[in-house]
Image (cartoon, rainbow, N blue to C red):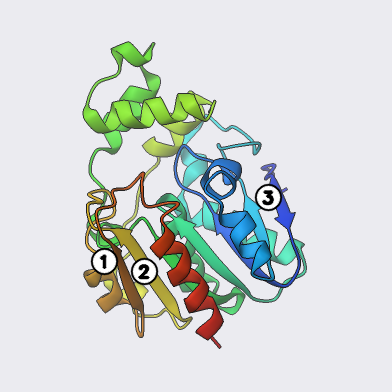
Amino acid sequence: MSDDVEIAYEVHGEGEPILLIHGFASNGKVNWGSTGWIELLTKAGRQAIVIDNRGHGKSAKLHDPERYSAREMALDSSRLIAHLGHERVDIMGYSMGARLTALLGIHHPEQARSLIIAGLAANMVKGVPGSEEVAAALRAPSFARAEGKQGRAFRAFAEQTKSDLEALAACMSSHRVLISEEDLATIKAPALVIAGEDDTIAGPVEPLVDAIPGAEGVVLPGRDHMKAVGDKTYKLSVLDFLDRRP
């Protein structure tokens, strides 16, 4: 329970903990289980903590956009870390989860041993276009009535993950405050930024790397937003980063 919102999570394996925060319209099982991440991390001797963000997976489905501020969603993860009795954990987020990961590094730095920000790069600062289109597509009476390439893609994915469409639409309709370069400059944890070369949702890696002190960057050749999640280079880069960090 985070404040008055029921938050679902799973813990896999033993060892140094890493919190995994999934992307929009996904859930912990799809984002991290189906792509092999949980197995990879547990075999590497780490404990994988997998959260379902509010409105997603097995967590509470709220239909009020006001309940989906990024700060509050990041606080759900912060509360989970504390609930599990961990002082500091490595944190990896993909897409929407990457934004929440950055916010944890900014507002809850004492809990972040390191940050892995994937599937969202320069557009974390510039903004991701198409939120109104996606929300409208999620609220359309059927997939056939959904409009826009991006809107239809997220509607199809939401149906595939058997999500609560109205909860996702509320999440997408929430007021979005961009993360400034000034805020990113306050991050003290070691950070790794990863995105696909063809990921138009994430934007280019380099500007976000430049905004976070000491950050490293990895570009995944030929990968777009959907295909980058289970990429081998992404996985190897993360394992190397975790092995090297203090």
Hey, what amino acid is under mark 3? Asp
Residue that label 3 marks: 3
Instruction: Tell me which label, 2 or 3, sits earlier in the chain.
Output: 3
Residue that label 1 marks: 205
* Total residue callouts: 3
Instruction: Tell me which label, 2 or 1, sits earlier in the chain.
Output: 2
Hey, what amino acid is under mark 2? Val
| Residue depicted at 35% across the width and 49% down the height | 176
Helix or strand or loop: what does disc 3 sit on? loop
Q: Which mark is residue 118?
A: none
Whole-Å distance between the Cαs marked 2 and 3?
30 Å
Whole-Å distance between the Cαs marked 1 and 3?
34 Å
| Residue depicted at 54% across the width and 25% down the height | 162
Q: In which quadrant of the rendered view does residue 108 lie?
A: bottom right
Residue 239 drawn at (x, y percent): 52, 72
Q: In which quadrant of the rendered view does residue 171 lie?
A: top left
Instruction: Tell me which label, 1 or 3, sits earlier in the chain.
Output: 3
Whole-Å distance between the Cαs marked 2 and 1?
7 Å
Residue 28 drawn at (x, y percent): 59, 46
Q: 10 Å neighbourhood of mark 2: few (<14), some, or many (≥20)?
A: many
Residue 47 drawn at (x, y percent): 70, 65
Say above or below: 212 vs 195: below
Quarter occupied by the C terminus:
bottom right
